[in-house]
Image (cartoon, rainbow, N blue to C red):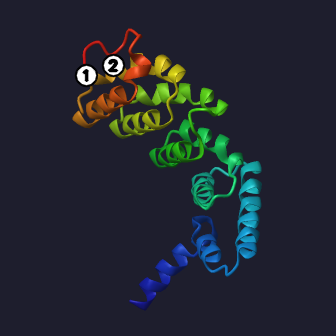
Amino acid sequence: MDFISYGLKAFFSTRPYGWDMIRAIRSCKIAAEERAVVRKECAAIRAAISENDQDYRHRNLAKLMFIHMLGYPTHFGQMECLKLIASSGFPEKRIGYLGLMLLLDERQEVLMLVTNSLKQDLNHSNQYIIGLALCALGNICSAEMARDLAPEVERLLQFRDPNIRKKVSVFYSLFKGLLATDFCFNEI
């Protein structure tokens, strides 16, 4: 039992996972200590971004999301969200979409770059990737993005999975005002 608990502790205490960062931030007694830890971690994440480290990109973005939730600026991680969304693996896409929904809003100019990735993911064969794209679209969609992606979303009304059809219906109810004058969603 000690060997297993030691192995788990060693697994979760490695630097890339972020547990050390969280422990260091939570153990700070004053705000100046916390700012110093966050500054050091942000510098390490920036260095990893500049080195284009593929293996730890999603872990670094998860750290950035934690730092963002603490109230610190993390604008330098926006392009990392887009890179993760454009990747082919589901875990990377999941963290990328979560970062997109957390770090960006519909007023960011960076969102114009994500429209093509959303279009590709809405046409994907994997229902979970389609669900990620629909969830992100419901959270960060602008009027222009809704108009650009409306044909793909409308096509998903006939998708085989009922959960995808429900997400499309929720998307439509959220953006009914934006799409009222458009040609799409006539079937609902």
Q: Badge 2 is on which residue?
A: 155
Front-lying residue, 156 or 105: 105
Amino acid beneath label 2:
Arg
**Secondary element at tag 2:** helix
Which quarter of the figure is the C terminus placed in? Answer: top left
Tell me, yes or no, whether the two marked residues, 1 and 2, touch with CB atoms within 8 Å.
yes
Crowding near the residue tagged with mark 2, few <14, some 14–19, many ≥20 C-alpha atoms within 10 Å: some
**Secondary element at tag 1:** helix
- 170 horizontally vs 177: left or right: left
- 143 horizontally vs 30: left or right: left
Image coords of residue 159 (percent x, y) = 27, 26
Q: Badge 1 is on which residue?
A: 158
The structure residue drawn at horizontal position 27% and vertical position 33%, both measured from the top left corner, is 166
Amino acid beneath label 1:
Gln
Q: Which mark is residue 179?
A: none
CA gap between label 1 and label 2 equals 6 Å
The structure residue drawn at horizontal position 34% and vertical position 26%, both measured from the top left corner, is 172
